[in-house]
Amino acid sequence: MKHKRILAALCIGTVAMAGIAVGAASQSETSVTNNISTSIVNIDLETYTQEDDAVIPVDEDSGPLMLMPGMKISHIPRITNKAIDCYIRASVDITSKYEVERPITEEDISGFSEDWVQRGEYYYYTNVFRSNQSTDLFDTITVPAEWDTKYDKDGEVADHYTMNDWDITVKIDAIQSENFNPD
């Protein structure tokens, strides 16, 4: 009988120890909430023009400009970095409403700073584009001098030289500078 009591005490002790171990193990767990956020690349593109000594935003509602052959137009695409440091590149696409002998091309665009370099169809900004920094892509477009009034075979003014419409589309791409090595 004495052996049964000792055996019962050992069983009760083993169960108690197992309960204590389970209780201790469940209390050693801790829950932590981690808030992780990613960085944001956010750039802005606006168009400005130089008037006298001031650079002002282009008023899109003012209607078309009256241009003359050989005229230089102040046209400043300005890129602003509103988030983290990044690298940027730009492409310029020129479309004309009418077919002309000498269309406006990228050769008619000037005023690129030395911070921009052209490689293929893109212009690359050669430095890290810092947060809250702004840079101008170019500043001038020249209307081809060949756009002087042309006449057809009947001596009439050829409208597509005097009434030409064209669009310049600038697209900007950006990628965060951290963990990126440009070539």
Image (tube, grey):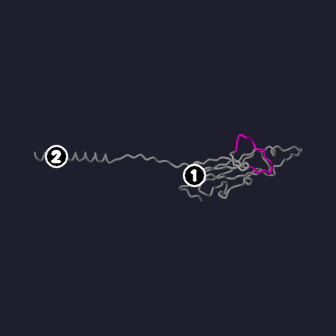
* Residue 70 included in the magenta stretch of the image: yes
Q: Residue at label 2?
A: 9
First reached walking from the N terminus: tag 1 or tag 2: 2
How far from the left and from the top, in percent, is residue 165? 76, 44
* Residue 10 included in the magenta stretch of the image: no
Q: Which mark is residue 131?
A: 1
Residue 98 located left or right of residue 38: right
Q: Quadrant of the C terminus?
A: bottom right
Q: Which residues are magenta?
A: 58-73
Q: Residue at x 82, y 43 (%)?
A: 159
How far from the left and from the top, in percent, is residue 49? 71, 48
Task: Using the numbered discs, state the Cα–Cα distance from disc 1 to disc 2 in whole angstroms.
Answer: 73 Å
Residue 64 located left or right of residue 149: left
Q: Quadrant of the N terminus?
A: top left
Secondary structure mostly taken by the magenta-highlighted segment of the chain: loop
Residue 34 located left or right of residue 172: left
Tell me which amino acid carries mark 2.
Answer: Ala
